[in-house]
Image (cartoon, rainbow, N blue to C red):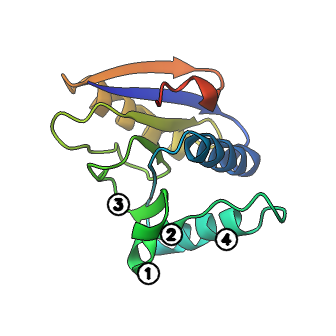
Amino acid sequence: MARVIFARVKEEKSALHRWLLEGAEEVCRRRSRLVILVRDSAMAARVDEQLWSEDEGAFLPHGVESTGLSGLTSVLIRVGVEIPAGAEVAINLSDKAAEWPTGWSGTVCDLIWMVSTQQTLEGRAKWVSYKARPDAAVEVKQDLDFSLIGVE
């Protein structure tokens, strides 16, 4: 069964940056595979830039799926909502609920943006979609500690 964790976010830029860095760092530390799901190629480029812009020595190897280099790293940036079978953790930044393969038992980390009415409605729609899935255990956190996501 997939585990879906929602975190409520009130500050978009700082929360997104923190989520990306903490999540990617923790998954890499555990030598697991992470996919970051984004809504479009412009968002993929922004996420790629954020992961490149960290301090020297803190670089997180990653790749954007469309570049062909993504198979060489443990962090994949993918446009769309489909989680590849090899990923153990997904950070969903898209505006739709993530989709996973049958039998997948990883963790989806998703956000409920509390910044605008539109984002709140999108978060609610994702929540409803996840809750309707018989293969998903859904929980809400005020904040997310990536060291507790259960990736082994």
Q: CA distance from mark 1 to mark 2?
A: 7 Å
**Amino acid of disc 2:** Gly
SS of the residue under disc 4: helix
Marks 4,2: beta carbons within 8 A: no
SS of the residue under disc 3: loop
Marks 3,1: beta carbons within 8 A: no
On residue 63, the disc is: 2
**Amino acid of disc 3:** Gly
On residue 67, the disc is: 1
Residue 107 in view of the camera? yes
In the image, taking residue 68 as reference, residue 47 lies left or right, namely: right
In the image, taking residue 133 as reference, residue 96 lies left or right, namely: right
Nearest to the observer: residue 109 or residue 147 = 147
- Name the residue at 44% across, 49% down: 33
- Return the x and y of residue 9 as percentages of the image width and height: 65, 35
Nearer to us of marks 4 and 2 is: 2
Residue designated by label 4: 49
